[in-house]
Amino acid sequence: MASQTAKEGDTILAIAYTQGFKSADDVLNDSGNSTLKQNRTDPGILLPGDTVSIPSRVLRQEASPIDASHKFILTRPKAWIRFVVKDALGVALAGKNYQLTIDGKMTKGTVPTDGIIEQSVPPTAKGGQLTVFLSDAPNDVEIWKLQLGWMDPMDSITGVQARLINLGYDIGHDPDGVLDDNTKFAISAFQTRIGVDVTGAIDDTLKQKLATYYDPAQDETTQDATPAASTDDDSTDDSSTTDDSSSTDDSSSTDATDDSSSTDDSGSTDDSSSDDGGSDDDDITDDDSTYDDGDNDTTD
């Protein structure tokens, strides 16, 4: 049986799409992926080095009358991306115009009341940019560069680092898997914010809280032990934040982290949102019932 070793940007969803399967479950439910399925519950997140077993495709036959034309609909995975855009206090940037470009395709809109922006994207989409216009002034903008599928699992140090960065906690560098002093300072600042023992260490409580703050449906300000604005620590960044999340859709979905300091499916403490050089690591997930843009391939 064939297998594929994951690299940065790979997702189960994209692998299923490129291999011709209907959904990510067709890959995850293969017996060779039992451990992977247990450890990677989100089909939009893989850790570089993960081994994905590629099941054999099964030929389907349909009995059809001859001398007639027949239409067959091929269901393929679809994907969408979700962001939550908020200021340093966790308040949505509602009413602000935005421009989202994914793999060269641009869409425009206005940030909704809850700050959640959703957009369908190809399952194989690799990157793009989100720009939010804070006023009519041409240079009064916040920009996040996006890397779709680059969010590592929470059980990795790089996954924790990426989520902290997206929440506005500056570790001084891109996620590198090293629990250095800057990362410990950022963890301590986040632990102070949520009111738990300040240890600078990665533990189950930290990961649970990061997951909660990273959920765009949650209002992180209600979970703060101290107001986000009072987090006067060098490990937090003065920029507004964007929250990238993911959801599932066979149709499917992608979510992101921002290497510039913004909040993701997640929350954030950044006063000015992400800077021009930041990059958002997104993860993708999949869910038949959530989104269907009708882009089914047909053949006669």
Image (tube, helix red, strand yellow):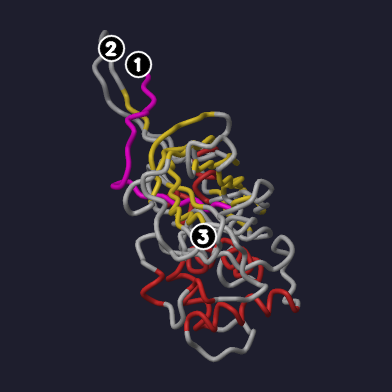
Q: Which residue is label 2 attached to?
A: 69
Residue at left offset 46%, top offset 39%: 98
Q: CA distance from mark 2 to mark 3?
A: 52 Å
Q: Amino acid under label 3?
A: Thr
Q: Residues within 10 Å of mark 3 (few under 14, many from 20)?
A: many
Residues shaded magenta = 281-300
Residue, far front: 137
Describe the element under mark 2 as helix, strand or loop.
Answer: loop
- Residue 103 in view in this figure: yes
Disc 3, SS: loop
Q: Main secondary structure of the magenta part?
A: loop
Which residue is nearer to you in this view: 237 or 1?
Answer: 237
- Residue 21 is labelled as none
Q: Is residue 131 left or right of residue 91?
A: right
Disc 2 vs disc 3: Cβ atoms closer than 8 Å? no
* C-alpha span from label 2 to label 1: 6 Å
Q: Amino acid at mark 2?
A: Ser
State yes or no: discs 2 and 1 in contact (Cβ < 8 Å).
yes
Disc 1 designates what residue? 300
Image coordinates for residue 115, horizontal then vertical, percent: 38, 52
Residue that numbered label 3 is attached to: 263
Residue furthest toward the bottom?
197
Q: Residue 296 colored magenta?
A: yes
